[in-house]
Structures are given as structure tokens and as C-alpha cells.
Amino acid sequence: MCTGHAHKQPSQAKRFPLPIQSYMQEGLSPNHLKKAKLMFFYTRYPSSNMLKTYFSDVKFNRCITSQLIKWFSNFREFYYIQMEKYARQAINDGVTSTEELSITRDCELYRALNMHYNKANDFEVGTRLRFCVPERFLEVAQITLREFFNAIIAGKDVDPSWKKAIYKVICKLDSEVPEIFKSPNCLQELLHE
DNA sequence: AGCCCTCCTG
DNA sequence: CAGGAGGGCT
């Protein structure tokens, strides 16, 4: 029913000279996924409403909407898992203060995250890239990491729902997604020069 | 009821 | 990532 790539063609479309809707995608494409991942650098908890304004070339329905929402849910899962893993690793390595925990563009954690969400850049080797992970993302990531670190240090992870408190903090740290992301061609505009 | 979230699976 | 279960909120 809501399978990922059900791109149905209206079959007898040749009789009509391309209605406006022809420009709309029936489903979500691989490029939409790449775009969504880049958007994650700005927003971890986008509302379905705002997603609709940023994917104007998508014909929304209940399935498409929940699929997009689900993507971000999956993004968050990966994000939080990395954070927890890194926090525990730091503790095992003897780190005792959050002051020692910072996210830089060359640290292991950042590389893992960038590899995951910024995959769109990978095959664009020789070209100049305009997109750069926003500084604010590094700040939010650092806050998240320290949040996990402190919670674990305090032994709060014995509570089955200990992460809820962290999620509550992080969901307030979303920033504005740049206007360019509203363009259906933003991927090309962002990756090339 | 309907939407969204997390958690767990494959 | 997609599916589905279970829970919260409106």
C-alpha cells in the first residue's frame, strides 16, 4: 500500500500536452532523500507542514507525508545512536568532564555523521561544492553529545525512558532551513557552482 | 480517529 | 531505509 517507490504512470498521458502536474513526482525520489538528509543538518524535527513547503515538487498524500516523516525519524535514530555510542566511548576512555567533549570537523563522530547525511557530495569529487555543513549543527551535536554524557555519568540510563529528557532538549534546537531548499533543483544548485 | 514519536526488526 | 507495534497527544 505505501511501498517506497510506486511510481505509477497515468498511461494515456500522451493525449494531453503536459499538464502542470507533470512536473510533480508521484513518489519520493533518491534525490529527495539526499535533500532530506542535507536538511537534517538544520532541522531534526521538521513538521509535516514545513516539509510540504520544502518539497513543493512532490504530490503529497497520507503515505508520502508519513514516508518523509519516517525518514527524519530514521535520521534521528542514527544520530542519537552515534551520540550515545560516542559518549559511552568517551567515558570508557576516562573522560570525566564535558569540557573535554567537543565536536570538530575532523573528529570521528563528525565524520560518521557527515558520511551518513552528506552522502550527496561523495560522487561529486572534482567539482567545487557550495554546500557546507552549518556551524550550528556542530553546536547542536556537541550539546547532544554532552547531554548523553552527563545523563550516563549520572546513572540516569537505568531508567528505560532516560533518553526522553534528551530528546526534549534537542527538539528545541532546530534552526531555519535556508530558502534555497525550497527549490526543486536545490540539490544541483547546492552541489555545483 | 488521526497524527507523530520511539523502539525493534529485517 | 521500511514495516509494524505500542504509546502519547489532540
Image (spheres, coloured by chain):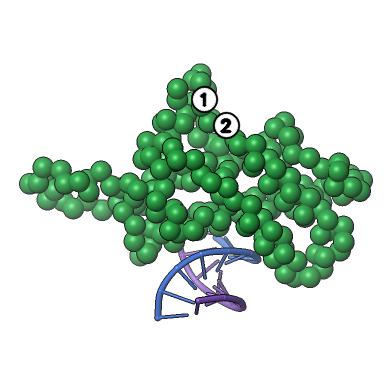
Chain colours: A green, B blue, C purple
> In the rendered structure, are the residues bearing label 2 and label 1 in contact, judged by CB atoms less than 8 Å apart?
yes
The amino acid type, in three-letter code, at marker 1 is Leu
In the rendering, which numbered label is found on residue A129?
A: 1
Can residue A85 be seen by looking at this rendering? no
In the rendering, which numbered label is found on residue A132?
A: 2
User: Outermost residue toward the top?
Assistant: A126
User: Outermost residue toward the left?
Assistant: A15
Q: Residue A155: x percent and y percent?
A: 86, 63
Element under label 1? loop
Same chain for labels 2 and 1? Say yes or no: yes
**Quadrant location of the C terminus of chain A in the rendered image:** top left
Element under label 2? loop
- Local packing at callout 1 (Cα closer than 10 Å; few below 14, some 14-19, many 20+) is some
- Local packing at callout 2 (Cα closer than 10 Å; few below 14, some 14-19, many 20+) is few
Q: For this view, does C2 lie left or right of residue A22?
A: right
Answer above or below: position of C10 versus A124: below
Q: Mark 1 lies on which chain?
A: A
Q: Residue at x 20, y 46 (%)?
A: A20
Q: Residue A49: x percent and y percent?
A: 43, 58
Q: Residue at x 60, y 37 (%)?
A: A134
Answer above or below: position of A93 versus A158: above
Q: Residue A45: x percent and y percent?
A: 56, 56
In the rendering, which numbered label is found on residue A174?
A: none
The amino acid type, in three-letter code, at marker 2 is Cys
Q: Residue at x 81, y 59 (%)?
A: A151
Say which quarter of the image contains residue A132: top right
Answer above or below: position of A73 versus A41: below
